[in-house]
Image: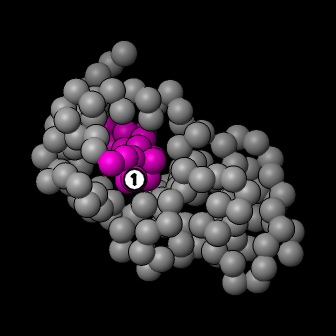
Amino acid sequence: MLIKTIVNNEPKTFVCEPGEYLLDTLRKNNYLSVRRGCDNTSCGVCTVLLNGKPVPSCSVFTASVEGKEITTVEGIQAEAEKLGHFFGSEGADQCGFCNPSLALTVYAMKRELKHPTEQEVREYLVGNLCRCTGYIQQERAIMDYLEDES
């Protein structure tokens, strides 16, 4: 089946099988920043933005994105690099496997919540697991990023 959508502000047409998940469609079309993790929505590493909202692409059927907008980390490259700088400053960037999905989720949060508290940040990021850190450095980096006006 053919699915027409917009990925990173570019019109795209994907060929997919009925029942195919967006994660698989994106990866077979070279959107390799969308990572495969648990395949059951537990880890968040496959997160993309669907019409601006973070979703685990391992649970979204490709057929359901007809006419919708998908954003991968490549679509927010400048913001992801800026966040990466804060991660590096706080020592929050270890293996990097979760960084694309975390960057997308933080980007969506920044657009949705104005001046979130640390607790609101924790709650918003609850679906993003990191196997390398204890989250303290990530939280500091995210708060610094959210407070930065440049």
Q: Of residues 131 and 73, which is closer to you in this image?
A: 131
What span is colored magenta in the figure? 95-118
The answer to whether residue 103 of the structure is visible from this angle is: yes
Q: Is residue 112 above or below residue 20?
A: above
Q: Is residue 71 left or right of residue 12?
A: left
> What's the residue at 86%, 75% (across, down)?
1
Q: Label 1's element?
A: loop
Direction front: furthest residue: 95
Q: Is residue 51 above or below residue 22?
A: above
Q: Is residue 126 magenta?
A: no
How would you classify the magenta stretch by its main secondary structure?
helix
From the top left corner, tell me how far across and down residue 141 is, in percent.
Answer: 23, 35
Q: Is residue 77 left or right of residue 7?
A: left
Choose top left, top right, bottom left or bottom right for residue 15.
bottom right
Q: Is residue 89 left or right of residue 73?
A: left
Quickly name the residue at label 1: 97
From the top left corner, tell me how far across and down residue 57 is, in percent.
Answer: 55, 66
Mark 1: few/some/many CA within 10 Å (<14, 14-19, 20+): some
> What's the residue at 53%, 72% (across, down)?
58
Q: Is residue 53 above or below residue 2?
A: above
Q: Is residue 115 magenta?
A: yes
Which quadrant, please, contains the C terminus?
top left
> What's the residue at 50%, 60% (across, down)?
35
Direction right: furthest residue: 2
From the top left corner, tell me how far across and down residue 125 is, in percent.
Answer: 29, 56
Please name the amino acid that badge 1 sits on. Answer: Phe
